[in-house]
Amino acid sequence: MADQKKQFTKVNQLRPLDTGLNLTVKVVDAKTVVQRGRTQGRFSECLVGDETGMIIFTARNDQVDLAKAGSTLVLSNAKIDMFKGSMRLAVDRTGRVEAGDPASFSVDESNNLSLIEFERVDVVV
């Protein structure tokens, strides 16, 4: 089981509520977010992507230090959260964010998955 290789996902393959994702992404832009009513924790919204597209990554606490514009990140056990109908990439306590080797790819800025708005549909059987 230790020899099991991680399956890496490309940004354009992400779908709402996906979990257990492994990605290598480049940070295009990072902005610190001030949480209203919360004094604990640091948050940053980063536009990250690979050669297939871009998505907003919500960095928390220690992740903020790694998520600087131009850096490459390796995300392990990431998940997709939904925020106001759009997808956001996040890594919680069960995952890891690590600095990766400088990206040898250019980010496709024409395909931003966070701009796609999804609508929840409940089916009653």
Image (cartoon, rainbow, N blue to C red):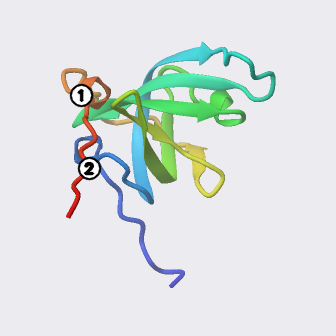
Can residue 43 be seen here? The reply is yes
Whole-angstrom CA distance, mark 1 to mark 2, is 19 Å
Q: Quadrant of residue 33?
A: top right
Instruction: Find residue 41 and report its horizontal and vertical position in percent.
Output: 75, 29
Instruction: Find residue 50 and report its horizontal and vertical position in percent.
Output: 31, 36
Is 21 in front, or is 80?
80
- Is 88 situated left or right of 35 in this image? left
How packed is label 1: few (under 14 Cα within 10 Å), some, or many (20 or more)?
A: few
Type of amino acid at the residue the image marks with label 2: Asp
What residue did someone put label 1 on? 116
Label 1 or label 2, whichever comes before in sequence order: 1
Instruction: Find residue 83 and report its horizontal and vertical position in percent.
Output: 43, 31
- Which residue occupies 39% across, 27% down? 84
Is 90 in front, or is 23?
90
Question: Which quadrant holds the C terminus?
Answer: bottom left
Can residue 101 be seen here? The reply is no
Describe the element under mark 2 as helix, strand or loop.
loop
What residue did someone put label 2 on? 122
